Amino acid sequence: MPLQEAILQLLSPMGIFLIVLGTSLGIFVGAIPGLTGTMLIALTLPLTYSLNSQFAMALLISIYVGAISGGMISSTLLRMPGTPASIVTTLDGYPLAKKGKPDRALMLGVMASFVGGMISWGFLVLLSKPVAELSTKFGPFEYFSLVVMALVLIASIGGDSLSKALFSGALGILVSMPGIPAATGQPRLTFGLVEMNDGFQLLPVLIGLFAVSQILREVTVVSVIPHSIRIEKKGLFFRLADLKRHGWNMIRSSFIGTWIGILPGIGANIGSVTAYSVARNTSKTPEKFGTGHEPGIVAAESANNATVGGALIPLIAMGIPGSVVEAVLLGALVIHGLQPGPRLFTDSPVIVYTIMVALFLANIFMVIIMIGSMRFLAKLATVPRAFLLPVILTFCVIGSFALANRMFDVWVMMGFGVLGVILEKWRVPLAPFIIGFVLWPIAEENLSAGLMSTNGDWSPIISRPISIIFLAVAAVLLLIPPVRSRLSGRKAAIDS
Amino acid sequence: MSVFRHILAAIAIIALLVLRFSSDHSDTGESTSYPEKPIHIVVPYPQGGGTDNFARLLGRKISEENWIGEPLVFLNQPGGSGTIGSRYVKDARPDGYRILCHHESIITAQLSGAANFGPDDFKPIAQTGNIVLLVVVRKDSPHKSIKDLLIAAAESPRSIRFGANIGSPAHFTAMKLEAANKGAAFNLVTAGGGQTRYNSLLGGHLDAGIFSLAEFISFQSPEGTAPDKDIRALAVLSKGRHPDYPEIPTCVEQGVKVTSNNAYYWWAPRKTPELVVRKLAAVLHKAMDHPDVIAQLKEWSIGTEFTRGEALGTKVEERIAAIKPFKIKARTKLPNFPRYAIILTGLFGFVALIRALKKNPTPRKAEEEKSSKSIGFLCFLVLFLYVYYFDKELMPFALLTTVMVFLIGVLICRFKIGKLLPILEIAALTGLGTEFIFTALFSVALP
């Protein structure tokens, strides 16, 4: 029985050790701004040559799960997203922590992550084959419309000023343009510099905007007193009442995360943004989002963890990696002599079950490790800034460098650090910038591929059913907030 | 901070210092022959990609057998269709300590305009391994042979959507196919990597595409899969049929006189001494002949061809000559995206500015009132100098980092004497610790 074999292998002392090691390393690295899970997995890959293929996959998958969960720690406590997937968590996590409830914010995040991970795991185990076929129904125009839908969400997470949010998003799109677009193969906006051929990478831009600028702003504050916190036993436990209050949100966000994770190349960022916007738009109190509102944390964290299982579905069922991390995992399979692809299930079922079991175990250990270290983690918010910030800066620099072994990325990080300070000074929200920056290249690549295959005809965008559905949803999402505020404004007028 | 913690920190610092200098000293041998320090192999693609797996396979064998006496350090510099990694090697000191493993994109990138340098700016060390390419369609496609496909492409030009990324070696192959049949014109679509192209084929978003043999094998579905969920090869582009797949005919057999393949090449900066190149080529040759490597390459469906020396020069010339006649031009006019982005940014920026000016200036937050700009500026200056020194490699990384962490820490705590010692400890631990983890464990090339 391949399933038994996989379970026995992973429950052996070595298997457990590797999963615990991977999960803790992932959490740790995910929590450090500047270092991401993707980087850790890429750097660890050559170290796994000496392990057998099952152990190697177990280690890499545990890192993946750990990292995507660990990102919320620094998002919540320091307002520095540890990984791109946890940008949305900063919106409500940090304000809640600032109110003196970092433990509560983390606990909600951990539980939401766990539920998200488990629901997407269920999809992976039960439905991977039929669900994976969905991804072939998506042609370039469908992807384009999906991404347009997510881009529209910029408007709904932008904070108080819509015009500033749109400006921020547009600037993000502009900044994503330099480099060699796949469609033409010609460098554009690179000013003749070969270094610019790859444009600006997400990691240096992200940590420049969020971490470096945050640090530069914090150091200017005289007598940096970390906000005082009280860690109560109560905050450390997830109660039944919470489940009642957040259960539906968790399930809905996990479904959103899973389905978005399935689509190759879309990934965790869109998953958490979409779930957050849906939570906000369906909420009775949308104005509370962004001020430390619990459902915001729950939606973001359940969705980004759910994308992990979702993204593994096409990898297992069809050999198609759903994200950068998956591409590295695919490479790991190849190195260990396994042929990823549609026949993986029939040719090497043990490895498929290993992936499934490892994902399950890593989720369990993630919760145990996070809860076990919660008191310690929450105290991170109280560490004197003079000790903490310079160390984080070191990781920002070294992380940007290690990304592709080049200094250009470090300078990019510095530049965006300054830009972040300027934008914050003008009260321009940063989240829309990153969303525009991340999403536009995907939208453009697909639109270009679509236009190339129709010889320049745009009509499939509205004539293909899936595509038009996404555009309709985008329109609805765009219209809900203004319509609602008008309605409530009228109501308020009547009341007065 | 208790005394105990200070002692602990001191012990850790001393341990890291000992570790650092002991490993430094072990390298200083007396020999003057190449190589006397680790050789950096630049892979211009990400970890786990085809090129990376291939290069590391050879590298691992060379290290295991200790054929070169120094460690091989792999540096992945992905991006820009491989131009970033190759430029890094092109500009390196020509001493053989930084070399490149890259496939034929190095030729096509120059011809397509993605890079202003090409094979002439390098010295080829060896060609190792060749990749067999195939033309693939969905199993239920009406086209039964490559000739069928080309005739259809001639009857209604640009109706067949052919997946070949612009500027890639596959793109040139597709153009060669068109040229082999008068009037044939594909609609060449940039459709992403192998997995995405496969997905698009199955979903009916592409009609045909070029795949490597390894990709073709991995994407084949188990027996009995419905024909619209499987793929089929029309022709193999090598000179003869592949021994493992004798049922797939070559293009030439079908009357289409096109052969094409891709191969991995090792390159050094142009002025690298001949002796160094020969030594590297000899080691690579040994690795390619090793039974373990041969077995693994067979599994990956990569040919074991090896070329070096003068034959290699001729071969590279031949490849360039075969590709050069084809001009790359985007065939579909795409919107000028950057222009729209600039307009959009300007527009929203303008609106935001107007609205901000209209509103009364909002009262500043309490925390901003107490801020001191000079400290912020000094911190930025320290950070800037840190990155600058790092870039120019003016100081060893550990020392540089220690100084930076200490200075910024002191600035943040506003020169409180009581905090100086813990900050110094943290600084030293950070500097030494990160250097150890990243160089010893993860082989990142810090200065």
Image: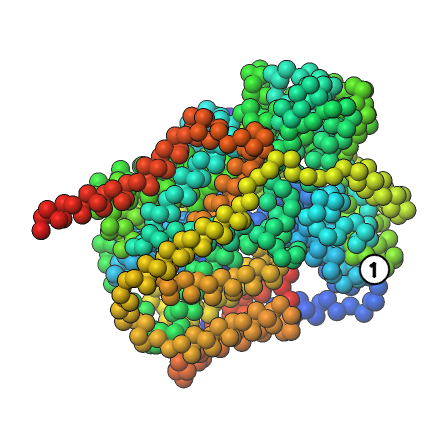
Please name the colour scheme applied to the rendered image: rainbow
> Is residue A453 depicted above or below A79 in this figure?
above
Residue at image x 48%, y 35%? Answer: A143
Disc 1 designates what residue? B271
Mark 1 chain = B
Residue at image x 83%, y 67%? Answer: B32
Does B302 sit left or right of A488 as displayed? right
Is any atom of residue A75 visible in this view? no
Which residue is at the front of the view, B135 or B332?
Answer: B332
x%, y% of residue A452? 59, 33
> Is residue B33 depicted above or below B212 in this figure?
below
Amino acid at the residue labelled 1:
Lys
Outermost residue on the left side: it is: A496
Does B402 sit left or right of A125 as displayed? right
Does B136 sit left or right of A313 as displayed? right
x%, y% of residue A51? 60, 44
Is any atom of residue B100 visible in this view? yes
x%, y% of residue B330? 65, 38
Residue at image x 84%, y 54%? Answer: B277
> Is residue B71 depicted above or below A60 in this figure?
below
x%, y% of residue B350? 40, 57
Graded by Cα atoms within 10 Å as few (under 14), some (14 to 19) or many (20 or more), the crowding at tag 1 reads: some
Which residue is at the front of the view, B94 or B287?
Answer: B94
* Callout 1: SS: loop
Does A203 sit left or right of B2 as displayed? right
Which residue is at the front of the view, A218 or B410?
Answer: A218
Residue at image x 90%, y 46%? Answer: B310
